[in-house]
Image (cartoon, rainbow, N blue to C red):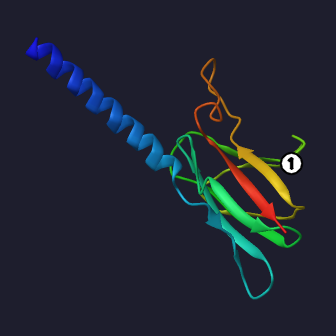
Amino acid sequence: MNLSRSLRGCALGIALLAAGADLAGSATAPFQARTDADGVQRVSLVGGSHFFRPAHILARAGLPLEFTLSREPGIVPHRFVLEAPDGSTLADVELDETPQRLRLTLAAGGYVFHCPNRLLFFKSHREQGMSGRLELRE
């Protein structure tokens, strides 16, 4: 009986640790795009093994927004696809270790970015968590 109780306690502890890790990961504060003296908002975005960093970006609508896009070192190819609130594609950029710039001026709203790449019959990178959101506010 004591062994059974110990195993249940251990399983409960593991479940609580896992839940805490999930909550800690989702509690990451959004990144606020910085506006430089030239009036351009800038964000450096890195893609890697099923992540974008930062994954949640806040910016002001109607001002130019410049992304510096890059990929972490490695051989797995990734792309940055930005979708408008209506689901249309606004940008589709192959990520490289050498940074690339993408400049857009967008209206207020919620935008999604992701990597649609997939290897053979595996889940797409997006399905494995390689996505994020861009919020543009007035």
Q: Quadrant of residue 50?
A: top right
Residue type, numbered disc 1: Ala
Across and down, in percent, residue 9 comes to 21, 26
> On the rendered structure, is 2 left or right of 62?
left
Q: Write down the residue under mark 1.
A: 84
Q: Nearer the viewer, residue 129 or 81?
A: 129
Q: Quadrant of residue 54?
A: bottom right
Assign the N terminus to one quadrant of the image: top left
Which residue is at a point 90% across and 61% down the rendered structure image?
A: 107
* Vertical order, 3 against 20 (above or below): above
Q: Residues within 10 Å of mark 1 (few under 14, many from 20)?
A: some
Which residue is at a point 88% across and 62% down the rendered structure image?
A: 106
Q: Quadrant of residue 41?
A: bottom right
Q: Nearer the viewer, residue 54 or 85?
A: 85
* Vertical order, 129 against 28 (above or below): above
Across and down, in percent, residue 19 comes to 41, 37
